[in-house]
Image (cartoon, rainbow, N blue to C red):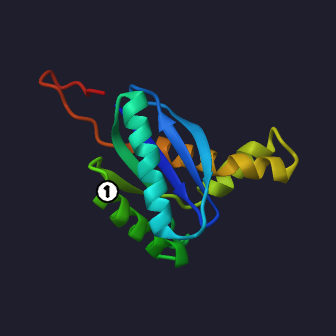
Amino acid sequence: MRALGIDYGERRIGLALSDPTGLLASPWKTIANDADVGHAAARLADEIRTLEADEGGLGAIVLGLPRRLSGEPNEQTMRVRKLADLLGAIVVIPITLQDERLTSHEADAHLAARERDWRRRKAQVDALAAAIILQDYLDNRPRAMTLDGNHSQ
């Protein structure tokens, strides 16, 4: 089942999707944000409903949780937790908060190798950061064991 990755920002929200096997994350798109967490939750719920109708459903939502490098909360942490609560009240898909420290920096560094103009990179960095968050989740989630001791997908 597919998973949706979200990188919440005050101006832009990056979205990423996994492939149907749930193994690979790819940047999907970026949507504008007006810094209102309630509006963001409603817009994301609309995107999720569209994905469920068009793509055959989602099994997980992975929301990047910002923190300081020390692991302590920052100004954005409470906004993201509020977004998770609001979104969780609208959709029935499980929401996981995933550490997102340095993902935007990693995404920008990756894009800088191909595109020197930071204005062009800015349009892509949030979706790529969402893909990095989602891939980290996919790579580190526990896999269910089958009866023969092998890991299932």
Q: Which residue is mark 1?
A: 90
Q: Residue at x 60, y 51 (%)?
A: 31
**The quadrant where residue 101 appears:** bottom right
Q: Residue at x 14, y 21 (%)?
A: 148
Give the vertical position of 146 relative to 33 (above or below): above
| Residue 132 visible within the image | yes
Q: Residue at x 53, y 70 (%)?
A: 36
Helix, strand or loop at mark 1: helix
Q: Which residue is situated farthest in the top direction here?
A: 148
Across and down, in percent, residue 78 comes to 44, 75
Horizontal arrangement in the rendering, residue 41 relative to residue 109 (left or right): left
Horizontal arrangement in the rendering, residue 147 relative to residue 57 (left or right): left
Across and down, in percent, residue 141 comes to 34, 43
| Residue 139 visible within the image | no
**The quadrant where residue 82 appears:** bottom left
Across and down, in percent, residue 94 comes to 29, 49
Q: Residues within 10 Å of mark 1 (few under 14, many from 20)?
A: some
**The quadrant where residue 85 appears:** bottom left
Across and down, in percent, residue 110 comes to 72, 44
- Of the 4 image quadrants, the one containing the C terminus is top left
Mark 1: amino acid: Ile
Q: Residue at x 26, y 49 (%)?
A: 92
